[in-house]
Image (cartoon, helix red, strand yellow):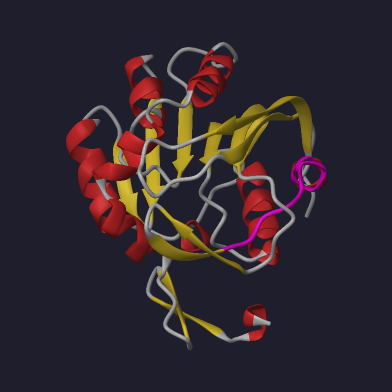
Amino acid sequence: MPGTRRRRRKGSTMTTDDHRPTAAAVFDALGAAYEQAFAGSEAHRRSLRRLLGRLAPGSRVLDVGSGTGRPTAETLAAAGHEVLGIDVSPVMVELAARQVPGAVFRRADIRDVALEEGSFDAVCVYFSLLQMNRSDQAAVVRRLVRALRPGGHLALATVPLDAEDAEGVFMGQPVRVTSFSPDGVTALVREAGLEVLEQEEVLFTPDHPDAAPEPHLFVHGRRATAPAG
């Protein structure tokens, strides 16, 4: 199985012994084309509207895998919220900083970022876990829940497939993808300490000649009590 091959950390990105493209390399190559391909996702915008309806004015929001800054950071910053975007891709961080000057962006791997307990009112995790293994995904979600204040909200989106270290091509770029079934995603969120408020599953086709239709799952959760360890 490809998943048995060793991975090693190098700085804030992942490298592998078989020289697979890292998440940073994939999204450096895609750049602004990624934004264009997903700009038509009305489900993403509905998810953001739901989140905005739950936030107090001037909320502090962490955007994990912030990409080009659009639509997530741009929408939140335009609504008056304080947004910190984290992304492993230097190209994406540069694009986001230029396109959304009302937010702050950092190049980093979320697994390496120190997160203070209860320091954010909301966290967005839109399609940014798929190139992590299942153990890392679960650990990251637990850490993000701990970073929420009590009553804080998490908006998460992923491609809900029961797949582990599966080979694929994404917008012309070779990738390895790991995810969970829809029930597995909601279980992951609940086990991290969130009350699931709602979820929506849609089929979306990115606007790109090499893209195929893919299922998207959007989950909204609230930290009501102390999260799981």
The single residue placed furthest to the left in the displayed view is 98
- 4 or 76: nearer the viewer: 4
Question: Can you say which quadrant of the picture contains the C terminus?
Answer: bottom right
Residue 31 location in percent, x, y? 26, 49
The single residue placed furthest to the front in the displayed view is 209
- 142 vs 10, left or right, is right
- Residue at image location 55% in from the left, 36% down from the top: 123
- 200 or 228: nearer the viewer: 200
- Residue at image location 47% in from the left, 38% down from the top: 62
Q: Which residues are magenta?
A: 177-186
As drawn, 162 above or below 22: above
- Residue at image location 54% in from the left, 18% down from the top: 46
- 160 vs 31, left or right, is right
Residue 223 location in percent, x, y? 72, 32
As drawn, 213 above or below 218: below
As drawn, 12 above or below 97: below
Residue 158 location in percent, x, y? 60, 43
Whether residue 28 appears in magenta in the rendering, the answer is: no
| Total count of labels | 0
Question: Can you say which quadrant of the picture contains the N terminus?
Answer: bottom right
- 76 or 181: nearer the viewer: 181
Whether residue 183 appears in magenta in the rendering, the answer is: yes
Residue 185 location in percent, x, y? 74, 45
